[in-house]
Image: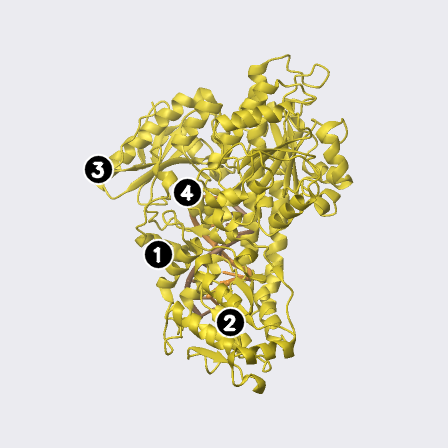
Chain colours: A yellow, B orange, C brown
Amino acid sequence: MNPDAGGSSSASPPPSSSLGAGTEAKEEEEEERGGKLLLVVLMGPPGSGKSTFAEAVVGGSNAGRWWVRVCQDTIGNGKAGTKIQCLKAAADALKDGKSVLIDRCNLEREQRADFVKLGGTLHADVHAVALDLPAKVCISRAVNRKGHDGNLQGGKAALVVNRMLQKKETPLLTEGFSRIMSCNDDGDIKKAVDLYSALGPSDSLPSGVFGQKSKGPVQVGIMKFLKKGDTSSVEKSSGSKLTLSESKPEQQNPLPKHEKVEADITCPMEVGKGSNDKKESGEHAKESDSDDVGSRTLAFPSISTADFQFDLDRASDIIVDTAADFLQKFDSIRLVLVDLSEKSRILSLVKEKASKKSIDCSRFFTFVGDITQLRTRGGLQCSVIANAANWRLKPGGGGVNAAIFSAAGESLQHATRKCADALRPGTSVVVPLPSISPLHQREGVTHVIHVLGPNMNPMRPDYMKNDYTKGSKILHEAYNSLFENFASIVQSHMGKQNGRLGAEMSASGGTSPNDTKMKREDSHGSERMKKHKLLPPTMTTKKQHECTKANTPNCHDNSMTSSAAPNQSREGDNKKSGVLANKTWGSWAQALYELAMHPEKYKNTDSILETSDEFVVLKDLYPKAKRHVLVISRTDGLDSLADITKEHLPLLRRMHSAGVKWAQKFLEEDASLVFRLGYHSVPSMRQLHLHIISQDFNSTSLKNKKHWNSFTTQFFRDSVDVIEEIEQHGSPTTTSDEKVLAMELRCHRCRSAHPNIPKLKSHIESCKSSFPSHLQQKNRLISSTTMHVDCT
DNA sequence: GTTCTAGAAC
DNA sequence: GTTCTAGAAC
């Protein structure tokens, strides 16, 4: 602790030549040192370690540097002061020939603008140092600290941190900073401290953006990032630097006016035209690099319309429909349809239809160019590309498939082999592209998703004989599978960053144990990615993987249908997503099945509330809230959402109605409750069951992260949505990626992050925020004040 | 799904 | 030392 830290500002001893102050003296200093004075704006929420940083630099070993720390928490005679006071102190110090560290949160652009301006006016180099630690680390530290200068600690701190992080805006060079340094963990912070502490009088630091690997969206939270209906903070921080919209004049789709920031990342419905505008291309690439938009962008070719000769008009409808659905579900994700030629008929059809549908053209657009050279020749930053694969997942054959395999080199073939041997029409498989692949190195492509669509070409395998009813369904499925897989990549990308950063929980000093831990978690995380991400949705075991292999166009279903295991889904239940819904259930997972098949055996227990031919209503044995019941289907072989087809719609509607009825009954007993009805994407217990659960989550049986996330993330599929999706597409889209269950803990009402279950639980006891807006729509919530629409 | 428990985090 | 998480076993 610097002895002067309690005052309005603290400085290490100034060099004698700077005594006497004034601009002149300062300029002399500059000349002498060969460098300008610095105004370093720290950014970070409470708990991010700004003061520690500032104290280390100001009071550290660098006695030759004349730093002044301007700390808003102490500027008022040791107590919190105002921004004006900070500005004045900073101005005085700069005029005095001292470099300044601004120690206040400065998370929003507006909050720091005056300091940037001041630096400019007084000819100082203005740097940003963003302390971008994960929310939960900051919260944990802020909550636990004692004797904080600004008296912000304890429960109040968590609230403040959360509120601030919602508004965080990533610093940009365009704000006026000459250098931006982001610190994503304690190691980064130490490096930054060392860097600034070690600056000699004549040293200067290179300009530019450094260390911005972990982007704003990650810090704001995965849910915030992915879920529709949240505030715009993510777009603000993620999108503010891209200016694709400026790249081409022929913008067709004007942006909604309220999405100003998005407009910055927007493009006209069609951009690109390949290669030649070097300036533009460079700009895109550069801008995108400093943002995370590339990792949230999927470029895909039109599936089935080339060699497989699928009707273009129908295909374009399907592309636009599936893309629109997908974008509705996920915010901040970009989809780009790519084709080589400007004259591409499919591109113009899609453009026209997307425009008619008023799809946000910043998040879905067409692009003329080579999908294997999007960054270098097209200036489009994009980490995930889709491949219109063949069923054998082999290179060659011409078209996009040949181009991608050729551009990616042999490593793509090897990586593909590890994931699958073959693909069924209507499905896709994610292949992480090894870093040695030229496509990875040159274009920044991290994943290739192979997709197989329906074939309408009599010369190719699995010819569909012009059956467009089936063909359209399969093409629909192919795009859905592609987009879902893409979503899970983005999710796991975010989750991984959070996981890695989340390992950094201890106080600022500890580097080596943390480093060890970090590496371990990181490699562990990669392992997990290997296991899960290689497989299409819902496939998580080797066995299932093999099933898919067996289920290729040439192998059909024989190996599966002969399955005699009594605890597996029956044959024929798995027509949908190309990924077999088969799953082996542990003995413990049979309980609901047993009950559904033989409710009479259990009729003496008071857990069964109602029995009909179609379902049983049961009090959950381990309720995760004050009221938690299950409506269990009695249909044999219907184990999870993955088994559902349109035939089950009437059943689902009746299960829903039964659930609503019970919710209303409970509301009569306690009008303060709010209920949500839904299914787990991947249930742990066999036999399809609908959860009716009150949103207090006040239960000792709710014990861990998996419990919480299974009811409060997209893993929980609202019954109304499931029903709607079956009505529209014949099957529900399940978020089969179980990694959401390991995500950070966020309040289901205010979305604030919490470091552990006990702290989360104590928060939700008192959180009175209204529910996120998407939950308040379509009767997803049932309370004493809502009306419900009967789905029967 | 839960229980148990080692060891990480605090 | 206590609290908490996460993986294994069932």
The residue carrying mark 4 is A711
- Does A293 sit above or below residue A644? below
Q: Chain of mark 1?
A: A
Q: Residue at x 52, y 42 (%)?
A: A738
Q: Secondary structure at mark 2?
A: strand
Earlier along the polypeptide chain: callout 2 or callout 3?
Answer: 2
The amino acid type of the residue labelled 4 equals Phe
Question: Which label sits in the foreground, 2 or 3?
Answer: 2
Nearer the N terminus, badge 2 or badge 4? Answer: 2
Please tell me whether mark 1 sits on a helix, a strand or a loop: helix
Q: Position of residue A213 (x, y in %)?
A: 59, 55
Would you say residue A706 is visible in this rendering? yes
Cα distance in 3D space between marks 2 and 4:
44 Å
- Chain ID for label 3? A
Marking on residue A396: none
Reading the image, the residue beneath label 1 is A762
User: Outermost residue, front direction?
Assistant: A24
Give the crowd class for mark 3: few <14, some 14-19, many >=20 residues within 10 Å: few
Are dots 3 and 1 on a single chain? yes
Please name the amino acid that badge 2 sits on.
Answer: Leu
Q: Position of residue A277 (x, y in %)?
A: 68, 41
Give the labeled residue for mark 2: A101
Q: Which mark is residue A668?
A: 3
Q: Amino acid at mark 1?
A: Ser
**Picture quadrant where residue A339 is located:** top right
Query: Of callouts 4 and 1, which one flags the residue occurring earlier in the amino acid sequence?
Result: 4
As helix, strand or loop, the secondary structure at mark 4 comes to helix
Asked if residue A369 is positioned above or below residue A462 in the image, the reply reads: below
Residue A311 is left or right of residue A732, and the answer is right
Looking at the picture, how far across and down is residue A545, in whole percent?
63, 34
- Is residue A576 visible in the rendered image? The answer is no
Camera-side mark, 2 or 4:
2
